[in-house]
Structure formats: structure tokens, C-alpha cells
Image (cartoon, rainbow, N blue to C red):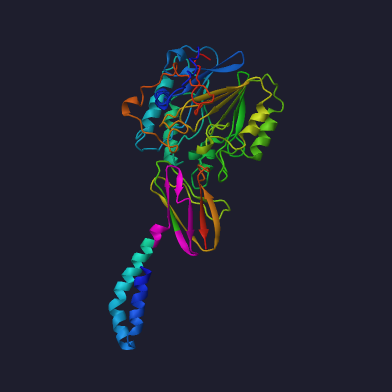
Amino acid sequence: MAKKGLDEKGLGRREVLECMLWAGTGVLWTVSGGIPHSVGLIGEAAAAEPTGFTFLQMSDSHIGFDKAANPDTLGTLREAVGKVKAMPTKPSFIIHTGDITHLSKPAEFDNADKIFGETGVPIRWVPGEHDIIDEERGKAYLERYGKGSKGAGWYSFDDHGVHFIGLVNVVDLKGGGLGNLGAEQLAWLEADLKDKSNSTPIVVFAHIPLQVVYKEWGWGTEDGTRALELLKRFGSVTVLNGHIHQLAQKVEGNMTFHTAMSTAFPQPAPGSAPSPGPMVVPADQLRSKLGLSSVSVVQGNKPLAIVDKTLAG
Amino acid sequence: MRNLMNQLRLAAARLSPGRAAVAAMLLGPLVGALLAYGAIAAQEANEVKIDNFVFNPAELTIAVGTTVKFVNHDDIPHSVVDKNKAFRSKALDTDDSFSFTFANAGSFDYFCGLHPHMTGKIIVK
């Protein structure tokens, strides 16, 4: 898809907001020639005829959240899952980039599991900060989803020649800082990558963006660059994150960064509001803006680096 | 408030012992009420509100022994974590609060355990 590019004035805040899609469902990815491409949002024509290996990213379900921005997060998740169920070709698996629940309560996990289970597709999880705020700080998450993982829940696996790495950057956060991977996880990552050839396609997923999207709101990972240093030698690296509840895509050399929408509620674009947090949008916009093909805002000297989405790859 | 209390004490002191006892009996409930009012006022003054991902006031100076109440007014949970582990709240959902009594003097830098870019400071003198 040809990018429209920024005109000289760039996009105004209103236009950016109009382009922002909030009620996310999932983003379908396929791998061709060893490089993952986003095929499109599920429900779109482009995503209707995937070929070969595909996987889906879903994020930020926030089951348990019931405030004005979306009193029915279970309902919107159910709708998103309904679209997965309706896909003519099921993806190989779903990557969920965290904040499954809002408050890490057992009932919230139960409800999420029940609905996600209806997809009939295996799900690979990483925790968001909302998934580890039980009394024992993450025990509930690990008991449910941590099987075979290391530390706070990080792991890797291979599928169709792609090496997938799930990282945890929401644990042991430092005052004044951003997301945090920590020395133990970075050492594990280094060892995990050691025997991989440079031509192995890599997909890394974690909740908080690994690169800094907007420091003032804590949208980035303190030691994320150390992970990216380890990944630099690979020919194809795709980084999938959630947390910011909006689409943002950026390409840097061989690395593609992508953040997913939430299935629960939108958050404002970086710097467009006094603070992050659930954003109330008119009810008729809640589900109607799932078309992304016309959006292209690229990072440049503009205040905002949001949504560069080439749906056709 | 304090001036009023002092004046009451002075007035009581000027009275003869017998009269002072009577005055104290009469004034007792009033003084008690005033003390209670003072306690409530002090508590409100020592509250840190969490609004729009910000601790407000960001810096608060209190006397040793003061209890500070942190109240979350956001739609998103937050927590209150001391940098040096003197205190750590559980996750506070909307309108939940956490109180901590500062028994020792010092400077306490704290942050939100979920959103660590949110920081604040309590100075205890």
C-alpha cells in the first residue's frame, strides 16, 4: 500500500484522533520470505484470505474494568473472539501482549480464560502490570500461564522457522523509571539467542513497548535498548507490544515495532491529553472504526509518532 | 484552631481550682469536639490525591507521627511504593486508599508500582 505521507502541515490532533481505532480486535500476521507481515485487522477483507502460517496478536483485554470508557470489557472481548471464531482459516496461535485482567482477580482470569478458550486456538501470553497485582505479586499469573517459563514468565519457542520470544517488562519497576526487563532476563535472552543464526526471523513480544514511545507517560522500557542490542544482528526482527492501547508502527533498519489496540478501551495519543488512561469516546464510535488502511502517520519531526500501518505489508 | 484551644486553656488557668474543675467539666465536651475537629482537619491536610496519573501534592512536609492517606481517584489502579521499601501499598482500585504513619523523620521518595514514572515525596520533620 502506498503511503500517503505527511503533508507539510502534518496531521492535526483531530485527524490523528479520527484515525485512531480503539475497539481493537486482533492483528493478523503472516510470514513470507522469512519476514512477518501484518495482514490486517481481523474482519477486514485483507485478512480474509491469509495463506500459509499466520498468527494473531490480541492485547489489553482488561477484564474487570467497568468504568465509563467501556462498562462491558467482557462484551467487547467476546465480540473480538467472535471474529476470530469466524475466520475462514484459523491462525496457528494467538499472542496476547498482556493486561488480560484489570486487577488480577481470580474471577477476572476465569472470565478471560473462558472467552479466549472459545477461539479454539492456542494462546501465548505475557503479563501486563495489571496481571501481577494480586497479593503475591504475580503468583496468580504464573500459576495459570507460567508453565515452562523462566523467572517472572519469560520464554521462547519456535514455529515455522520463526523464533518467538515472550519477555516480561512489568516486574520490579523502579521509581521514576519505565518498564524493566532486569539483568536476569537479559542474560537469559543473550543465552537464548546465542545459537540462532542471523537469518532466523525473530518475533519478540512483551507488554510495555520495548522502545520508548513516550517517556513522559512511562511508555517504554528502561533497559529495552539492551534487548534490542542483542537482536540487532538478526535480519528480521518484529517487536510486538501492547500497553498503550493504540496502533503504532515504526520501522528501524531490520526491526519493525508494532503496538496493538486494546479490546477494552482506548488511551489518548501521546501528549494529546494531560495523562494516559481510559479515554471515553462517543458510543457510536466504539466499534465502527476498524478500518486502518487509510491511516498513515509516520514518525518524523512531528510531535507524534503514531500509526504507520502498511496493512499490505 | 490552635489559638482558640490556647485561649480556652488560658481561661481555665485563670480560674480558681474549684471553678476550673467546673469549667473543665462544662468545657470538656466542647474541647473534645474541637480536638476531634482538629484531627479530621489534619487528616484531610495530610492526604495525597492520585488524579490523572499524578500524586498531588507531589511533595508533602509533615511532622513525625503523622498519618498520610493516599487516595486513588483514577479509573486505573495505582500503588504507592517507597523507593527504600519503608512502605508498599497493594494495588489501589478507583477510590481505594492507603494510609501510612510516618514514625521516623526523613525524606521518603515514593512511586507508583504500576506506573513508575509517577513519583512523589514525603518529608517528615
Instruction: Using residue B22 as the reference point, say whether residue A118 is left or right of it.
Output: right
Q: How many numbered dots are placed on residues in this image?
A: 0
Q: Which residue appears farthest toward the right when viewing the image?
A: A195
Q: Which residue appears farthest toward the front when viewing the image?
A: A8
Residue B45 included in the magenta stretch of the image: yes
A76 or A3: nearer the viewer: A3
On the image, the x and y values in percent for residue A42 come to 44, 19
On the image, the x and y values in percent for residue A190 come to 69, 32
Q: Which residue appears farthest toward the left when viewing the image?
A: B26
Q: Which residues are magenta?
A: B42-67
On the image, the x and y values in percent for residue B62 come to 48, 61
State which quadrant residue A74 falls in. Answer: top left
Q: Please, is residue A181 above or below residue B122 in the view? A: above
Instruction: Using residue A210 as the reference point, say whether residue A276 is left or right of it.
Output: left
Residue B41 included in the magenta stretch of the image: no
B42 or A145: nearer the viewer: B42
